[in-house]
Image (cartoon, rainbow, N blue to C red):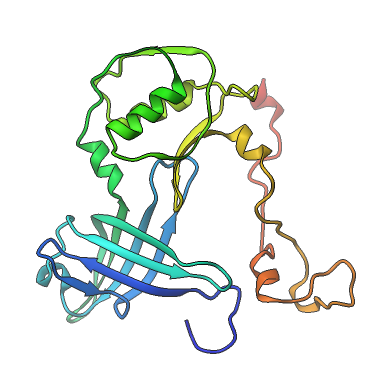
Amino acid sequence: MSPGPAQATDFEIKELVLESTNGSETDLLLQMAEVNVYENLHSSCISADITIDDSLNQIMNLPITGHEWVRFAFKTPGQSVVKLHLRVYKISSRELEKERRQVFVMHCIDGVEFTSAQTRVSKAYKGKLISDIASNIQTEYLDSSFNKIETTKNLFHIVPAYWSPIKTLNFLASRANSSTYAGSNYVYYQTVSGFNFVSIEKLCDTSPLQKYTSQPANIRKQSVAFNAPRTVHSDQVSIQSYKFDSSFDTLENI
């Protein structure tokens, strides 16, 4: 981030370190061209991709083999530091830009995804709440715990067909009914705060965490009643663009 007054789009990467299997650590800040971190309601684990501008042939010299870890620490103005520790699993889009200079994308994901891929659920659950089954699988097979879990209703019987823990948890989410809400739209996902097993109805019923506004950016003055004064925070919650992917399709509904 360049020096000077903080802008809404600024961010500061405080740490970006590649941890090799031989115990060495490599600072990637000077080689990093782009970093993306993803949280998704419909994705079980946090993931990230890092575009590396490499003139040292790090893939061969470190080497990078898909067994490394990346340590992140970053923040935006007015927010606390976010820290992540993700496992490298793939390199893509590897191209030679110039002689002795290549660009590639390094993909990372939470280590729980690897634990799940190497584990199978071989246990029968009879006459239990889905939320209790999910909690047991998360603890016993993924050595983790839930940040948020919503209690379900109705007793359930399941003998997973030697599925991975994450596949089993997503299956349970597709069958779960909330004990509080009428819907059955459970999601299993991870945020920087941890794993969650909750219904979309519950997420919609919570108090808003942030209010976003759409207003002309260049005319915001305190004297105008319906416009917010221009600050870093008001810029961070200003809607830059939006679109409607779908409105209605009565023929499709039929």
Is 185 on the left-hand or right-hand side of 171? right
Q: Give whichever of 233, 90 is nearer the camera.
A: 233
Looking at the rendered structure, the number of numbered marks drawn on it comes to 0
Q: Quadrant of residue 163?
A: top left
Q: Quadrant of residue 232?
A: bottom right
| 41 shown above or below 109 | above
Q: Give whichever of 151, 243 is nearer the camera.
A: 151
> In this orientation, does residue 34 appear?
yes
Q: Quadrant of the C terminus?
A: top right
Is 86 on the left-hand or right-hand side of 215? left
Q: Which residue lies furthest to the bottom in this view?
A: 4
> In this orientation, does residue 166 appear?
no
Q: Give whichever of 117, 150 is nearer the camera.
A: 150
Q: For the point 30% across and 19% down, which residue is it?
A: 160
Residue 251 location in percent, x, y? 68, 25
Residue 158 location in percent, x, y? 36, 14
Q: In which quarter of the image is residue 96?
A: bottom left
Residue 117 location in percent, x, y? 24, 37
Q: Give whichever of 61, 139 is nearer the camera.
A: 139
Is 30 on the left-hand or right-hand side of 214? left
Is 18 on the left-hand or right-hand side of 158? left
| 238 shown above or below 202 | below
Residue 127 location in percent, x, y? 41, 10
Q: For the point 53% across and 76% down, which residue is it?
A: 10
| 185 shown above or below 114 | above
